[in-house]
């Protein structure tokens, strides 16, 4: 866990996505602190520098972990902002402890309902299982990231490479083990934010990436549904890809500041 000291404004706990790491939120956290918000980032269990226990890769346990982080920080009414799966965890946490949070933000997450696209678990697993990258050359993986995201800064590539443990002789392996990744993915597949968000007692901001791909159409359907059923939820669109927090960190931080 890393913290950034702000003033007395509402604090933010920033939660990364599946197989990501806390460093991807560095620039958002730094900007929030400049704007007066205490901010903290955390590696979820099995990710980054956190422990890698054999169990606990379900949403209930991951939410318990996040509550322990909030207790350690001494924060009573924070906003929990999560990217991708981290956004769904933030929604789940708000549903479990409705009086503990001041708000929830999902950054191209929070409203992910992958079972709509893959009604059968086997289809979801086949489509979204992580590639087997252990032993790959770090240089080649970095080249692939740069090719996939030509507009990213060097910092964005650097913190994305922090998703991996760097091994001798230039090789890497993901911090999150394959079997643990699959367990979290199964929990995400089982998650139903469309049923949770309308009942949340706190404000919900959903920042959806307008990436122009097939996922955008699914997100627009969900945004329309929530607009009709969830009066406390607000959807903002931002041009970019799934990792808005590394692609547009300052713009995103300013939006979070204005929203809470």
Image (cartoon, rainbow, N blue to C red):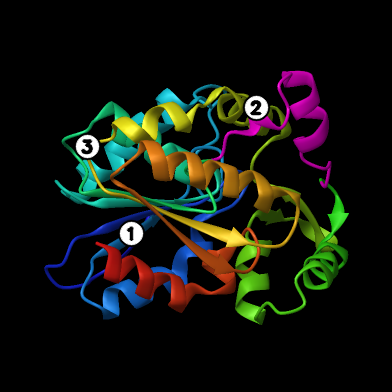
Residue under pointer 2:
115
Above or below — where is 219 with respect to 192?
below
SS at circle 3 = loop
Density class for disc 1 (Cα within 10 Å; few <14, some 14-19, many ≥20) is many
Above or below — where is 211 with respect to 106?
below
Residue under pointer 1:
40
Density class for disc 2 (Cα within 10 Å; few <14, some 14-19, many ≥20) is some
Q: Magenta segment range?
A: 112-133
Residue shown at 65% from the left, 27% from the top: 115
- 182 left or right of 140? left
Residue shown at 66% from the left, 80% from the top: 154
- 14 left or right of 120? left
- Of residues 187 and 134, the one drawn nearer to the viewer in this rendering: 187
Residue under pointer 3:
201
- Of residues 80 and 207, the one drawn nearer to the viewer in this rendering: 207
For marks 1 and 2 on the same chain, the one whose residue lies earlier in the sequence: 1
């Amino acid at each position: 866990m890393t913290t950034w000291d702000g003033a007395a404004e509402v604090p933010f706990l920033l939660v990364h996505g599946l197989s990501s790491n806390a460093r991807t939120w560095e620039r958002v956290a730094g900007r929030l602190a400049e704007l007066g918000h205490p901010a903290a980032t955390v590696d979820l269990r099995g990710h980054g520098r956190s422990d890698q226990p054999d169990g606990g890769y379900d949403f209930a346990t991951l939410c318990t972990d996040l509550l322990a982080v909030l207790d350690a920080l001494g924060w009573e009414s924070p906003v929990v902002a999560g990217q991708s799966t981290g956004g769904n965890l933030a929604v789940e946490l708000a549903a479990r402890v409705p009086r503990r949070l001041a708000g929830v933000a999902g950054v191209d997450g929070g409203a992910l309902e992958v079972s709509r696209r893959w009604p059968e678990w086997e289809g979801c697993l086949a489509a979204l299982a992580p590639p087997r990258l252990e032993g790959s050359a770090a240089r080649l993986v970095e080249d692939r990231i740069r090719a996939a995201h030509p507009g990213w800064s060097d910092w964005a590539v650097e913190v994305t490479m922090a998703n991996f443990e760097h091994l001798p002789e230039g090789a890497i392996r993901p911090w999150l083990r394959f079997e643990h990744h699959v367990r979290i993915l199964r929990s995400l597949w089982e998650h139903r934010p469309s049923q949770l968000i309308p009942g949340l007692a706190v404000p919900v901001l959903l920042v959806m990436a307008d990436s122009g791909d097939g996922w955008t159409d699914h997100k627009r359907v969900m945004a329309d549904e929530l607009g009709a059923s969830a009066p406390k939820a607000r959807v903002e669109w931002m041009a970019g890809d799934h990792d808005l927090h590394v692609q547009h960190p300052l713009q995103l931080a300013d939006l979070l500041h204005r929203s809470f």
